Amino acid sequence: MKRDVVASEFLEVLTKVSRRVRTAFNQQVTAHGLTYPRARTLFRLTKKQNMTQTELAYELELEQATLVRLLDRMEENGLIKRQPDLRDRRAKLVALTPHGEEQAAFVRSIADQIRDQIFEGVDISELQQAISVLERITANLADLEDVHVPA
Amino acid sequence: MKRDVVASEFLEVLTKVSRRVRTAFNQQVTAHGLTYPRARTLFRLTKKQNMTQTELAYELELEQATLVRLLDRMEENGLIKRQPDLRDRRAKLVALTPHGEEQAAFVRSIADQIRDQIFEGVDISELQQAISVLERITANLADLEDVHVPA
DNA sequence: CCACATTAGTTAGCATGCAAAGGGTTATTC
DNA sequence: GAATAACCCTTTGCATGCTAACTAATGTGG
């Protein structure tokens, strides 16, 4: 099997798995007004509150513009609140509401269940090796971004 | 390192890589009116033309509704054409236009370049192992879908 | 053959994603 | 200290993604 073929196959299966994970997760939580991106956001906030949106966007690997609307919806649903940063009037600090904390805990338990199922039959060492591969690819992609597209 | 933590990490890096691949690819081809999903569609059609939309959606792992609009745009851009299936008046057969064939070849070359870069420093055997892991996860996800969400 | 279910494609509504452009603050530079 | 740059968030416009509901055509049972 040639390298190019394997690489293509890898990209295909990566795309598919990624979509399936998102969809599977959504199916489990939509009834509660949640989605995969919202869950990711809740988790981050569980670990570190009162980040600015820029910081949070960086951690989630999202563009700021994308995060704005995500937070808009989460604020409407009472999951998070935005508070002014007293040291910088441009910035806003994002924090969980009590309801957000509850939902974060709920989502955590759902995520644990799903994880157990989707990783069934996969060794922890295999996972770690796969992570290593994915991280190297991430690094290579970061390099790629630095190279500007020729007009 | 606990299994849960590794599993979480895996999902995070999977999500991130997937987004980065899509974005990186888009940056290279948007100038030509192309996108990552359109490129995937072109590839499939290169391998097998005159599929019905249902078949194509299955191969691409997309919902039919998603494919409809994707094909709408590709048809507007003159990349593909939809022709009636003489054996089933409900169905439509999707084929590449000459322009679509050209673009498929162009995208192929771009994709080859990008692949070389993003997989730099990754062994083919590592890739194959990662594919194996991703495929097992896909299978587990398929099982998950069969289990209906309890109300 | 006729009622009914099933299937193919579409439409509509919602939620992410992105890039590009804009407004208000803060930082830098001269 | 004023002009300029940089930064934080937002808005806008576009392209995917999904589910749910709909139309038209085909299959199936009786």
Image (cartoon, coloured by chain):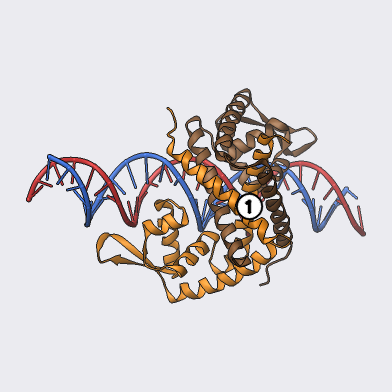
Chain colours: A orange, B brown, C blue, D red
Residue B40, located in which quarter of the rendered image? top right
Task: Quarter of the image for the C terminus of chain A: give it.
Answer: top left
| Left or right of residue D25: residue C29 | left
Q: Residues within 10 Å of mark 1 (few under 14, many from 20)?
A: many
Could you tell me which residue is drawn at 71 percent across and 43 percent down?
A: B59
Q: Secondary structure at mark 1?
A: helix
- The residue closer to the viewer here, A4 or A57, is A4
Is A13 displayed left or right of A97 in the figure?
A: right
Q: Nearer the viewer, residue A139 or B69?
A: A139
| Residue at 73% from the left image edge and 55% from the top image edge | B139
Quadrant location, the N terminus of chain A: top right
**B23, B119: nearer the viewer:** B119
- Residue A142 place in picture, x, y as percent: 47, 44
Q: Nearer the viewer, residue A6 or A40?
A: A6
Q: Chain of mark 1?
A: A
- Tell me which corner region of the image, top left, top right, bottom left or bottom right, holds residue B83: top right
Q: Which residue is mark 1?
A: A130
The quarter of the displayed image where residue A148 is located: top left
Q: Position of residue B125 (x, y in %)?
A: 69, 44
Q: Is residue B127 visible?
A: yes
Asked if one can make out residue B62 in the rendered structure from this viewpoint, the answer is no
Q: Position of residue C23 (x, y in %)?
A: 25, 50
